[in-house]
Amino acid sequence: MVALVTRRVAVLMLLAACSRAPRFLDYNGPEITEIRVYKGARRMELWHHDQMLHEYVIGLGQNPVGHKVYEGDSRTPEGRYVIDRRNPQSTYHLSLGISYPNAEDTARAEALGLSPGGDIFIHGQGRGNRWRSGDWSVGCITVTDREIEDIYSMINIGTEIVLYP
């Protein structure tokens, strides 16, 4: 009987490890006041005023050079935005929404007769993308699932994000 219970517990632990549901972490450190993304260096930094607190290697959209202009161009935007939403049910583990498009982005795309797109996020890999690395998203900023858990706990809605070329 003990062996059967032990096996069942082991199977449940294995299943839980494979599912890898998001962990919602607590953060008690200094407020993150700005996110800086350096697209060319594939680097994201989290800042508290004039002090860098954390740094991450990132992936970008499949077409990483240049500013996002229209829906479907697979580019990651450049410019100044804010984190405007949190998605704990993301297909990509957890995600933080970026306020793209702004009025200028919308006007630029509409002048071309196109939609600027939207739904640009900082997100993890999610179940089907754990093997991916590099620039694989359709315009988002990607990190590992463990990293997005940390980032998600530190970033508040309204945090400024600046994306440099």
Image (cartoon, rainbow, N blue to C red):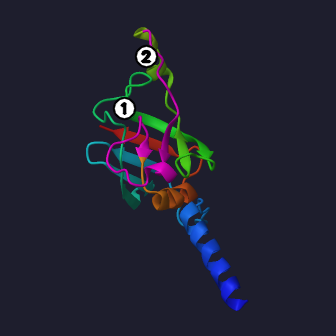
Q: Residues within 10 Å of mark 1 (few under 14, many from 20)?
A: many
Residue drawn where x is 54% and y is 64% of the image = 18
What's the amino acid at mark 1?
Arg
Nearer-the-camera pick, 6 or 154: 6
Residue drawn where x is 73% and y is 89% of the image = 1
* C-alpha span from label 1 to label 2: 13 Å
In the image, is 157 to the left or to the right of 34?
A: right
Q: Quadrant of residue 25?
A: bottom right
Where 77 falls versus 58 (above or below)? above
Where 42 falls versus 144 (above or below)? above
What's the amino acid at mark 2?
Ala
Residue drawn where x is 38% and y is 31% of the image = 74
Q: Residue 156: give x, y in percent of width and height.
A: 58, 50
Point out the frontmost of discs 1 and 2.
Answer: 1
Residue 123 on the magenta segment: yes
**What label sits on residue 109 in the rendered view?**
2
Judging by the rendered image, the residue that carries numbered circle 1 is 75
Q: Residue 124: give x, y in percent of width and height.
A: 48, 51
* Label whose residue precedes the other's in the sequence (1 or 2): 1
Report if residue 126 is visible in the image.
no
Report if residue 144 is visible in the image.
yes
Q: Work out which quarter of the rendered image holds the C terminus and state it.
A: top left
Q: What element carries label 1?
A: loop
Q: Give the range drawn in magenta.
A: 113-141
Q: Residue 163: give x, y in percent of width and height.
A: 38, 40
- Which residue is outermost to the bottom? 2
- How many numbered marks appear? 2
Q: Residues within 10 Å of mark 2 (few under 14, many from 20)?
A: some
Nearer-the-camera pick, 41 or 21: 21
